[in-house]
Amino acid sequence: MSVESDVQAGAHAAAEPRAAAAPAANPALLGLITFLPSGVTLGLWFLGYLDTATLPGGMIPIVTLSAGLFLMISAVWAARVAANSVAAIFGVFSAFWLSFGLLLTGLTSGWWGVADAAQVANVQRTYLLSFTLVFILLTLATLRLPLAFTAGFVFVDITFVLAFLGVSTGNADLFPIAGITTLLFCAIFGYILVDGFAQDLGGKAMPMGGALVK
């Protein structure tokens, strides 16, 4: 083969378009966008937009289906692509929303045989305390994530602490504050969602802040 033919062959190869790289899997997009409707509903519930005394069952469809089910799907997707931490995060949030939906269903329908107000409060205290401890542990375990994630988890922790104290002490004034902190962590996770979509569609990453633990 001559030098000229080699040059022509090289030029022809260079002119051929390269195959585009397959986009990286990002189950966080599905997880976050289906988490937010339930989070906003919870915040509005705490703020009194939905009557907490007579209409708690109105939250059941959105918390079990929008958040619980689709966060489970996101967790399975993340596990399949070996995004282990993402799978664990979505898994524990899925566990919360699904169990919360079942708790509301049971307490509003009498399925669990808990009807006395003191018994209901005891069940709620135990439930909230358990998830409060788990979410605090999650926050500490993920301090290597960018600061935006840590801030979101901290507001989740504050929300659960306020809800636990509100149920434990009977202080209803704590629930509107919990509603505000709920909407704050929804806003933070919404910011993270927009960043995820921007990067997935070819845009630049948005500032997330440095991790607290290197």
Image (cartoon, rainbow, N blue to C red):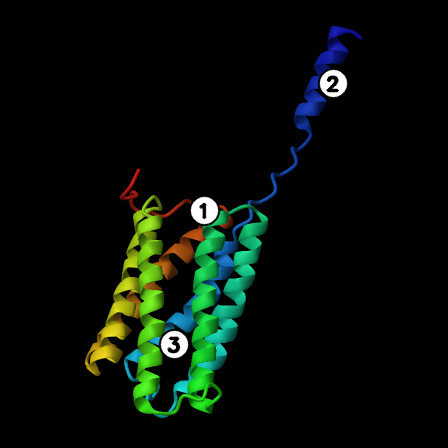
Residue 44 spot, x, y in % from top left: 33, 78
Q: In the image, is residue 30 above or below residue 16?
A: below
User: Of callouts 3 and 2, which one flags the residue occurring earlier in the amino acid sequence?
Assistant: 2
Instruction: Answer above or below: position of 145 versus 28.
Output: above
Work out how far the residue at label 1 is from the one at label 2, CA to CA, in angstroms. 35 Å
**Does dot 2 land on a helix, a strand or a loop?**
helix
Mark 2 sits on what residue? 9
Q: CA distance from mark 3 to mark 1?
A: 30 Å
Q: Give the residue drawn at x 31%, y 90%.
A: 117
Can residue 193 be seen in the rendering of this structure? yes
Rate crowding at label 3 as few (under 14), some (14 to 19) or many (20 or more) other CA atoms within 10 Å.
Answer: many
Disc 1, SS: loop
The residue where tag 1 is placed is 203
Q: Given this view, does label 3 or label 2 mark the residue nearer the observer?
A: 3
Residue 98 percent across, percent down from the top left: 48, 72
Disc 3 target residue = 41
Q: Amino acid at mark 3?
A: Thr
Residue at image point 28% right, 58% down: 154
In the visual, does 141 lie left or right of 21? Answer: left
